Image: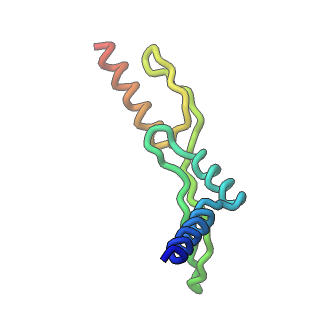
Amino acid sequence: MESDSNDETDKRDKFKDETFHIPKKRMIVILYLTMRTCSLCGKGTKIGRIRSHAQNRTPRTYKANIQKVTLAMGEEKISGVFCTKCLKRLKKETKEQQKTALN
């Protein structure tokens, strides 16, 4: 009975070592993908496939249009990395705030 439990613990220890091992190349890719994300909505790089006419699959990345911007909202300055959709929304909000301030 004791030998069976020791075998199981050895298997568990071996499994733990395998699950936490991350090759260096994959770790770099993960860090690269997380850096290109919008500060507001979290939109980032997506991974997909290209299909040719012959239905060949080729992996590719779809990158979000991310811009490093400093915006002046009233008296505050907001700096960060935003996607263009969020930039458009922020600019619209600042225009609305300016219109309400004038009225």
What residue lies at 60% left-to-right and 52% top-to-bottom? 33
Residue in front for this viewpoint, 9 or 69 = 9
Residue in front for this viewpoint, 5 or 70:
5
Q: Report the residue at 48% width, 48% height from top.
A: 43
Q: Residue furthest front?
A: 2
On the rendered structure, is 15 left or right of 92? Answer: right
- How many marks do you count on the picture? 0
Q: In front: 93, or 2? A: 2
Closer to us: 53 or 43 = 43
Which residue occupies the extreme bottom position in the image? 54
Q: Residue at x 53, y 59 (%)?
A: 46
Residue 12, percent from left and from top: 54, 68
Above or below for 51 versus 38: below
Outermost left residue: 103
44 over 38 or under it: above or below:
below
Q: Is residue 66 left or right of residue 26?
A: left
How far from the left and from the top, in percent, is residue 34? 57, 48
Q: Quadrant of residue 13?
A: bottom right
Return the x and y of residue 92 as percentages of the image width and height. Answer: 39, 32
Colouring of the image: rainbow
In this view, which residue lies farthest toward the right?
A: 24
Tell me if residue 3 comes above or below residue 92 in the rendering: below
Q: In the figure, residue 56 lies in which quadrant?
A: bottom right
- Looking at the picture, does residue 71 appear above or below residue 82? above
The residue at the point 28 percent across, 14 percent down is 103
**Quadrant position of residue 73:** top left
